[in-house]
Image (spheres, rainbow, N blue to C red):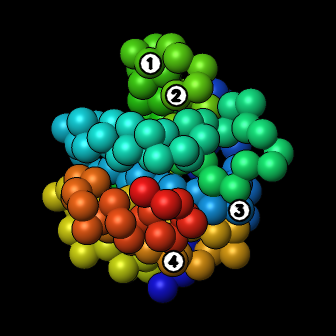
Amino acid sequence: MRFPELPVRSLAGDDVVLPRDLPAPLTLVVCAFLQGQQRLVDEWIEWAVDAGVAPSPLGLDPNATSTVIELPLLGRRYRPARGFIDGAMAAGIRVPVVLARTFTAYTDVAAFCRATGIDTQATVTAMVVRRDGMMPARVAGPPDAAGGHAIAGALGLTR
């Protein structure tokens, strides 16, 4: 499985193409499919930061080996409302570090899930992604002991 080429925009307004433009050699990408999954996204972000992962691409040390981003995935049918949706999210967040690490994708969500091996949209999926698209680890659900261990190992952390 490889992370597919995916054009995205950060809530800070930066257009990039993942995985090529990932902010670090190893990036923990936390994929969310429903607004109600934000609590689990936040749990993964907290887990990552506690483990020593850079909390955002904003001001990222050039020597950093890993960071974390949020990736809300919305269907293509929402693309015409992107300005409204992204604007509402940004207005609700207003924290530069969070705006810089949140990238929205308006895409064929089912095709993205097939390409990355995600078998459910009922929960979040956290995956370690390299710039070449390789994904050394992928975990669905909260950062429990087994999932945290798999992600930490892929990030080279001693958690």
The disc labelled 3 sits on which kind of residue? Pro
Task: Say which residue label 4 marks.
Answer: 136
Mark 2 closeness class: few <14, some 14–19, many ≥20 residues within 10 Å: many
* Circle nearer the viewer, 3 or 1: 3
Q: Residues within 10 Å of mark 4 (few under 14, many from 20)?
A: some
**Residue 53, relative to residue 140: is it above or below?**
above
Q: Nearer the viewer, mark 3 or mark 2?
A: 3
Q: Earlier in the sequence, mark 3 or mark 1?
A: 3
Query: In the rendered image of this protein, does residue 136 appear above or below residue 151?
Result: below
- Spatial CA distance of label 4 from label 3 is 12 Å
**Of marks 4 and 3, which one's residue comes earlier in the chain?**
3
CA–CA distance in space, label 2 to label 4: 25 Å
The number of discs equals 4
Residue neighbourhood size for the residue with mark 1, other residues' Cα within 10 Å, grouped as few (<14), some (14–19), many (≥20)? few
Mark 2 — residue? 98
Label at residue 25: 3
Kindly indicate whether the residue at mark 4 contacts the one at mark 1 (C-beta within 8 angstroms).
Answer: no
Earlier residue among tags 1 and 4: 1
Query: Between tags 2 and 4, which lies in front?
Result: 4
Task: Tell me which corner region of the image, top left, top right, bottom left or bottom right, holds residue 116.
Answer: bottom left
Q: Contact (CB < 8 A) between labels 1 and 2?
A: yes
Whether the residues at callouts 3 and 1 have beta carbons within 8 Å, the answer is no
Amino acid under disc 1 = Ile
Identify the mark nearer the N-term, 2 or 4: 2
Check disc 3: other Cα within 10 Å, few if <14, some if 14-19, many if 20+.
some
Q: Which residue in the structure is indicated by mark 1?
A: 93
Residue shown at the point (17%, 58%) measured from the top left = 122
Q: Nearer the viewer, residue 47 or 138?
A: 47
